[in-house]
Amino acid sequence: MVSTDLTGAPSRAQAAPVTASPFYRAAWRWHFYAGLYIIPFFIMLALTGMAMLWLAWIDGRDGERLPVTPQDAPLAVSLQAEAALAAVPDSTLVQYVAPRAPDLAAIFRVDRDGTATMVAVDPYTADVLDTFPRRSGWYDLMDNIHADLLLGVTGDRMIEIAASLGMVLIATGLYLWWPRGTGLARALLPRLGRGRAAWRALHGAVGLWISVILLFFLVSGLSWSGVWGEKMVQAWNQFPAGKWGIDVPLSDSTHASMNHGPKDVPWALEQTPMPASGSNAGAEGLAGPLTVDTVDAFARQIGFDGRYQMNLPRGNTGVWTLSRDSMSTDSTDPTSDRTTHIDRYTGKILADVRYDDYSWFGKAMAVGIALHMGTLGLWSVLANTAVCLSVLFLSASGVVMWWKRRPRGQLRLSPPPLPADLPLWRGAVLVGLVVSLAFPLAGLTLIAVLLFDLVLLSRLPGLRARLA
């Protein structure tokens, strides 16, 4: 449960400071410090997350939800591509994103002098409907703020600390609000009093309701982080390139090289080397000349219906790549994920990876990321919106309770007092070590706060008087 109460002391209506156990006080103190850091980040994550949910649903992540009037049959993809290339002279075709429905535009990515431009084309008339720089819309701005606050690595680490400390917040919040002799129903549906007691009851109940859901969001969100996600989890859970086949040559690039801005390839494949064209390896695939038209027809033949993405070969050993995955909002079903690589010279299929080929953790991440991003349809957009609104309420109510309990006319932090005698302290240290090993940045932060609490505040009475 997220119970970010910044009050600095239990409510008299719930637990008087005199009777509160030392362990309760310690949990409250850690809860206070965690909430103090986390609240601004949780507000930012909830607001940007909601914005992305609705921008993707209404306009599309790639601006692809431009309506067109359906006709008998779409034109050849090559004719649509010619119109896209003409809209940006001297450009090169890089990617084709097929329409997700017959009444929507097709999207082409064309590059000129290192600049990527997306071109929306009417698939029935080849009219250019819009052009815009790739990854430059409102969705991408929200996504970049959500990911790293537009601060790069520094912002990524700050948000990872907040998400990691969220585990501490949930654990201490559950301990503080868990019913003791009153029954779970009373905790989930409490009686509301007045003033701060009402705020605390609502705060605790909402936090208890969404605690498990929020834990899921934190863990799945951390999969994008630079330390816990990329260095600890993804590094040892990658898809083995050996599954391509022993004769399939490998590129020096990984699938992550296909990412530009928001991730475009499944989480389980990012660290896996790309196959390379130029051998006789692979399964029978596409015979005859390889063009955007023949590759598109082949994609439809082997089951890429609706929206899918076609990436053209780049370089002498580049491959044609056909992909569909829910993380790229191609579909609303993560179990239909599929990535197919085709040799640019022979047309043979070098790799054909589906959801069933992922490890159990890769499957969990595919479904988890789809749930996190709300790409499973309107119901998931609405459900995620409710979670975001709950997080905003918890953050705001924590500040309100602190405001109501602060010393009148003063803006001191007023954290709960540090217990002089903490029973079971060895267990608390063990929990801290487990959190530190599982989430390194949270561990470093906990150590920093502990040093601040026990070293600085104990030796600087003036600073302690200002904060306490």
Image (spheres, grey):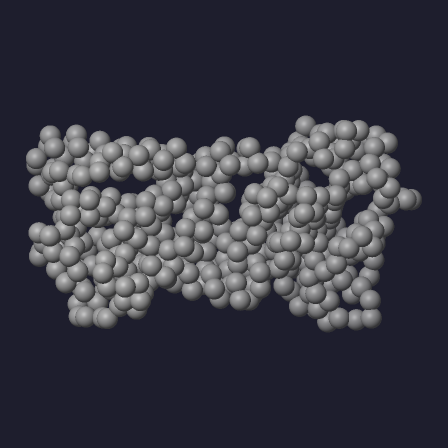
Write the residue at 43% across / 40% down.
Answer: 156
**254 or 426, which is in the foreground?**
426
Residue 173 position within the rendered picture, expressed as x and y whole percent measured from the top left: 29, 52
420, above or below 390, in the image:
above
Name which quarter of the figure residue 432 lies in.
top left
* Image location (x, y in percent) of residue 439: 40, 37
Q: Where the N terminus falls, by quadrant?
A: bottom left
In the visual, does 361 lie left or right of 313? left
The single residue placed furthest to the right in the displayed view is: 288
Looking at the image, which residue sits at the far front?
Answer: 181
Residue positioned 22% across, 36% down in the render:
425
Front residue of this view, candidates 426 and 373: 426
Q: Residue 106's spot in the image, x, y percent?
A: 71, 59
Visible residue check, residue 55: no
Query: Is 65 left or right of 426, judged from the image as shown?
Result: right
Q: Residue at x 12, y 60 (%)?
A: 12
- Residue 386 shows in the view: yes
On screen, residue 192 versus residue 308, left or right, reads: left
Number of marks in the rendered image: 0
Q: Which of 282 and 407 is in front in this view?
A: 282
Q: In which quarter of the image is residue 345?
A: top right
Report the front residue among 108 and 461: 461
On-image quarter of the C terminus: top left
In this view, 285 is above or below 276:
below
In the rendered image, residue 151, in percent from the top left (x then y), is placed at 42, 40
Q: Which residue is drawn at 68% across and 43% down?
A: 357
